Image (tube, rainbow, N blue to C red):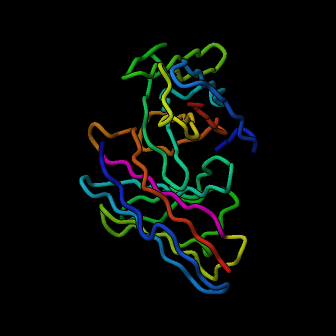
Amino acid sequence: GESVGLHLPTLSVQEGDNSIINCAYSNSASDYFIWYKQESGKGPQFIIDIRSNMDKRQGQRVTVLLNKTVKHLSLQIAATQPGDSAVYFCAENMGTGRRALTFGSGTRLQVQP
Amino acid sequence: GAVVSQHPSWVICKSGTSVKIECRSLDFQATTMFWYRQFPKQSLMLMATSNEGSKATYEQGVEKDKFLINHASLTLSTLTVTSAHPEDSSFYICSAQGGGNWNTEAFFGQGTRLTVV
């Protein structure tokens, strides 16, 4: 699958602020998207998902926005906490069976106390 | 969500030896498992797709004779890195998908840090 780049951009926010992490996905045919959180030395942890027939989905403190026109996905974290510090990846999937996920390059979120 | 367990969490081996990594789905039957590799500060790259009872499908550039995958049961897949070399040092992660409501969501193991010396 296509993975976007080798660089890991960093987003630094103050505790209590809202965070917005962006992702440009690669396949216009993808119809299922997931945001994962990965802490150092651990596997990815599911945060929230969205299907292509939606443009917004909310969870607990998190919201995912999908713009299919420009192939853009964003993750909004409300009232960011130090425990939110991690690397966040978006992933896309064709959604037509048991297909592997294609991961974006990731964004490191640093929450300053 | 479902639980996927990987073992070992970390391993150090000598160059030229083989290492086996296990991936187990603890509370569901995983008809498909995926193996990823992740280098420092990089994203997860798919190595292969493993279907229970059949041969794994490898991504382009991944040597099937070097990275042996076995998925003999619905709850266990293994990845064996044969004749490991320092360049194989990486973080290996498996994920599993079952059926029913988990038709698309993948659950990840905690990863295995392999260091070849």
Residue A9 left/right relative to B100? right
Residue B19 coordinates in the image, percent (x, y): 53, 79
The C terminus of chain B, quarter of image: bottom right
- Residue at position x 55%, y 51% in the image: A40
Residue A97 coordinates in the image, percent (x, y): 41, 40
Looking at the image, residue A107 lies above or below residue A72: below
- Where are the magenta residues, as a range? B89-98
* Residue B70 in view: no
Question: Taken as a whole, is the magenta stretch helix, strand or loop?
Answer: strand
Q: How many discs mark residues in the rendered view? A: 0
Residue B45 left/right relative to B4? right
- Residue at position x 65%, y 63% in the image: B62
Residue A50 coordinates in the image, percent (x, y): 44, 24
- Residue at position x 60%, y 58% in the image: B37
Quadrant of the image occupied by residue A51: top left
Instruction: Answer whether residue B94 is magenta in the image.
Output: yes
The N terminus of chain B, quarter of image: top left
- Residue at position x 24%, y 54% in the image: B27
* Closest to the observer, A28 or B36: B36
Looking at the image, residue B36 lies above or below residue A4: below
Quadrant of the image occupied by residue A53: top left
